[in-house]
């Protein structure tokens, strides 16, 4: 019984000899009758560029053309960013009416990045070595032999990539990689305003009528009752104008009417008219409209981060992350009985910015 059991085991051991991966050279195909066939690596087939230098030169020129196109596209990105107005609208089929600046920036930057990627892929597929070489697994140790092997493989890879030989590819790659980061450098311009005073001035001028945002009609003192809050803007702003949102973001105001004895800040009372106070409604934290009004306490609350301003005390900050009070607009009544501004804000409305001081 034991002899019959041992016989198949011996046959199995004999039949497996020569078929285990450790007993064959890498790349050596096993016999066709082997149920555990290791086909090995197929014979290496040379590409046309490997045997024809003219074909290799054509591939080199193609790669260089892609890198050069990337360089031109990056320059086009910068030119488009500087020259195309931000409010320019163009018709482009099949997208319809789109922002000319956004379309130009997307097209040029996409082309620049795509050409670098396409050039690298074409370089790898046509000029770099594509011969597959198996490598034995080894222990994960940084032994001197391993270091020497890695360095040798690196030098071999550099040589096989023809990076040193193909000077045209190398130089145009350097140029493309050097220019692409300029796109990000140019975009740094949008991190804040240029050194100008645009954020320090609004659409308010001396004599500007105060217009009710809801009715688009000028306001009279009797239109504002004690305990109410009215949102307003300066005359001359048209919601259909292309720069309306840019202007209203700085010029939007709110008017409240308090009993004169409830006003704690003397200057604030002098800048108002008959208990009517006009403040910027743009929160000084991140620019949300701080128009949630508590009638009993005279507090204005910003719904975004709960900054709270005391409108009876010069819009002083009571709570929240806002850094300074809401700017107040000096107002009076003109000869026709309408509320008007006596000038612009004394300080920039809205959140702080780098040059604000």
Image: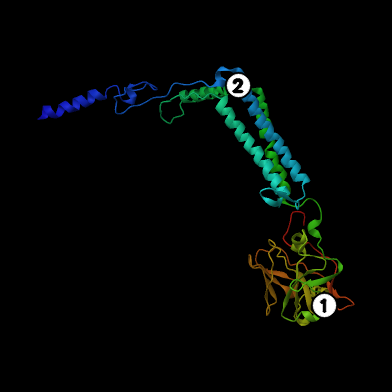
User: Which residue is label 2 attached to?
Assistant: 56
**Label 2 Cα neighbours within 10 Å, binned few <14 / some 14-19 / many ≥20:** some
Comparing 216 with 246, the one in front is 216
Q: Position of residue 100 (x, y in %)?
A: 73, 48
Which residue is the extreme one toward the left?
1
Q: Position of residue 342 (x, y in %)?
A: 86, 70
Q: Which mark is residue 215?
A: none
Is the C terminus in the top left, top right, bottom left or bottom right quadrant?
Answer: bottom right
Q: Is residue 21 above or below residue 211?
A: above
Is the N terminus in the top left, top right, bottom left or bottom right quadrant?
Answer: top left
Q: Position of residue 16 (x, y in %)?
A: 26, 25
Of circles 1 and 2, the one toward us is 2
Q: Which mark is residue 273?
A: 1
Q: How many marks?
A: 2
**Label 1 Cα neighbours within 10 Å, binned few <14 / some 14-19 / many ≥20:** some
Residue 47 shows in the view: yes
Snapshot quadrant of residue 19: top left
Labels 1 and 2: the sequence-earlier one? 2
Snapshot quadrant of residue 329: bottom right
Distance between the alpha carbons at the discs numbered 1 and 2: 84 Å
Secondary element at tag 1: loop
Secondary element at tag 2: helix
Snapshot quadrant of residue 343: bottom right
Comparing 253 with 338, the one in front is 338
Residue 178 shows in the view: no
At a point 17% along the width and 27% down the height, the residue shown is 8
Q: Is residue 313 above or below residue 100?
A: below
């Amino acid at each position: 019984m034991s002899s019959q059991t041992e016989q198949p085991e011996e046959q199995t051991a004999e039949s497996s000899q020569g078929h285990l991966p450790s007993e064959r050279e890498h790349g050596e195909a096993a016999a066709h009758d082997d149920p555990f066939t290791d086909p090995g690596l197929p014979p290496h087939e040379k590409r046309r560029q490997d045997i024809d230098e003219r074909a290799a030169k054509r591939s080199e020129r193609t790669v260089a053309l892609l890198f050069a196109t990337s360089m031109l596209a990056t320059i086009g990105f910068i030119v488009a960013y500087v020259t195309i107005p931000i409010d320019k609208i163009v018709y482009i089929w099949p997208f319809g009416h789109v922002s000319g600046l956004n379309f130009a920036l997307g097209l040029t930057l996409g082309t620049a990045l795509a050409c670098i990627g396409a050039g690298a892929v074409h370089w790898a597929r046509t000029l770099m070595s594509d011969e597959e070489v198996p490598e034995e697994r080894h222990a994960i140790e940084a032994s001197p032999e391993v270091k020497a092997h890695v360095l040798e493989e690196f030098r071999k890879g550099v040589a096989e990539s023809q990076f040193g030989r193909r000077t045209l590819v190398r130089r145009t790659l350097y140029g493309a990689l050097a220019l692409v980061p300029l796109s990000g450098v140019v975009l740094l311009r949008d991190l804040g305003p240029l050194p100008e005073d645009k954020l320090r001035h609004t659409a308010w001028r001396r004599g500007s009528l105060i217009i009710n945002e809801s009715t688009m009609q000028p306001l009279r003192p009797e239109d504002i009752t004690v305990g109410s809050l009215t949102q307003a803007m300066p005359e001359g702003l048209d919601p259909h104008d292309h720069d309306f949102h840019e202007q209203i973001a700085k010029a939007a105001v709110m008017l409240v009417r308090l009993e004169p004895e409830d006003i704690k800040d003397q200057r604030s009372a002098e800048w108002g008219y008959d208990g009517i106070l006009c403040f910027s409604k743009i929160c000084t934290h991140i620019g949300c409209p701080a128009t949630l009004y508590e009638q009993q306490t005279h507090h204005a609350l910003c719904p975004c981060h709960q900054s709270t301003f005391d409108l009876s005390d010069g819009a002083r900050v009571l709570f929240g992350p806002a850094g300074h009070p809401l700017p107040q607009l000096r107002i009076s009544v003109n000869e026709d009985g309408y509320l008007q501004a006596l000038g612009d804000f004394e300080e920039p409305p809205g959140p702080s910015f780098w040059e604000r001081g």
